[in-house]
Amino acid sequence: MPDLYDVIIIGGGPGGYVAAIRAAQLGGRVALVEMERIGGCCLNRGCIPTKTLYRSVEDYLDVLHAGRFGVDIQGEIKVNFANMMARKDEVVDTLVGTVIELLKAHRVDLYDGLGTILEPGLVRVKPSEYFPSAETQDIRGKTIIIATGSKSQKVPIPGTDLPGVVTSRGLLNLKTFPKSLVVVGASVVGLEFASMFNALGSKVTVLGRKTFMKSADEQLAKRFRSLLVRAGVAVTIGVDFKEIVQTDEGLLRVHYAQRDREDYAEGEVVLLSTGRTPYTQGLGVEDLRLKMDGPKLLVNPYMETSVPGVYAIGDVLGTYMMAHSASYEGEVAVENALGHRRAADYRAVPYAIFTLPQVAGVGLTEQEAKEKGIDYVVARFPFSASGKALAIGDQEGQIRMICEREGDGLGGRVLGVHIMGPQAADLVAEATVAIQLNATAKEIAETIHAHPTLPESLMEAAKAAAFGEAIHYRKV
């Protein structure tokens, strides 16, 4: 009879490994099954490697524009793409190794291979493509948590199997820098890569089927699109993809139609970035008869599936497909699995898009507030009016704050905050806490913020909402 675990987790990404550590902290005996490399998409081929490259791009741009800060640099400034990629690999390896050590320190048993649920409480670990020589073995647990994540959606057009047509995983494994890049899909991932590769000198074309940066505030997405075009990226939205072919010159040509007009874009590399879909291949969900909505597993607020003793978290739910929401759901799931009743609370789920400039937000957008019939006010504060933004030479963008409208017509409880500008991904943290705690614009406005800092801009936006006008910006 296999050993009995308190929790068996299938999937070692940011949802699964965080769940494993939290379960161990609560005194549970834990098994973690991973068919590839611990860390999942986020650590190995998503968040961490892309943000490591992002930092390299920032450094390159800082050096390129150092003259305006009074720093003279002699000689030609070059992009060493091989070294950038090597540093990316080094950072990934370091973090993956750190996570593995953390898991071992918490006495989590790691199983290499594909985990299949034979029945509630019983998981079979089999060889996977990454671990072809893994031992086949059965493990038993009182509860099972599915954390298998997602995979890139297939693009149903001919030519996607041609050499040089890649997903984000393939792009992160490039050995040479492409002089030209066509991005199929104006998603978050595609726009991050478009922004970075354009900054490094690649000729970039973005082709979108319906939307552009749909997860962001509509006004900020429009503003970012104009900035991207101004930076030299060709952007076309509303296209119907036809096929990808290879030209005699060795380029890849993406044929598309827009309003009955046919056209094409060419590049050395084509990035397929049309979103992700939940991954349940080989998991056994069909035999378990888990309740699903298409490819998505359905759960209640306690992360419980329709089968008792089986939980699900992260991208496999198809809702908030981000690493930080998966980690949060992992903690909620194990607490419930181990007898600590807790419902998931999604009032404040931030997003962060590492483009140039960054875009981030949390809570309702203006459009969502309008659709819900909420009486609201919108206040804004531009970074062009921020002393710190001026000092660091990064003034593009603004903060938009959506609040409930009070009886006096001014802003009350904060419903959403959306940011485009310097360090937006960090600035959104304060807004997330504010929404989680049901804070009002007045409470943020009357909180002392250190000077000179970028977070002062959030305070200024709150003043504009609560009092009708910011201190350092007058709307004319």
Image: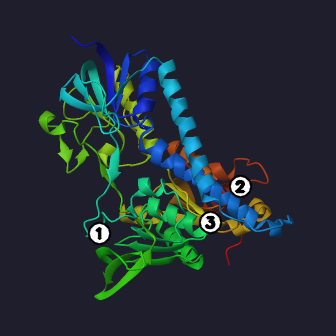
Q: Residue furthest top?
A: 1
Residue 195's image quarter? bottom right
Way the structure is coloured? rainbow
Label at residue 398: 3
Label at residue 159: 1
SS for dot 2: helix
Q: Nearer the viewer, mark 3 or mark 1?
A: 1
Q: Are marks 2 and 3 in contact (CB under 8 Å)?
A: no
- The span from disc 3 to disc 1 (Cα, nearest Å) is 41 Å
The type of residue carrying mark 3 is Gln
Quarter of the C terminus within the rendering: bottom right
Direction from residue 475 to residue 335 in the image, left or right: left
The type of residue carrying mark 2 is Glu
- Mark 3 neighbour density, 10 Å: few (under 14) some (14–19) many (20 or more): many
Q: Nearest the camera: 367 or 208?
A: 208
- The span from disc 2 to disc 1 (Cα, nearest Å) is 50 Å
Give the mark, 2 or 1, whose residue is nearer the N terminus. 1
Q: Residue at x 55, y 45 (%)?
A: 89
Percent x, y of residue 230: 59, 79
SS for dot 1: loop
Give the mark, 3 or 1, whose residue is nearer the N terminus. 1
SS for dot 3: strand
Give the mark, 2 or 3, whose residue is nearer the N terminus. 3
Q: Residue at x 76, y 68 (%)?
A: 76
The type of residue carrying mark 1 is Gly
Percent x, y of residue 148: 32, 39
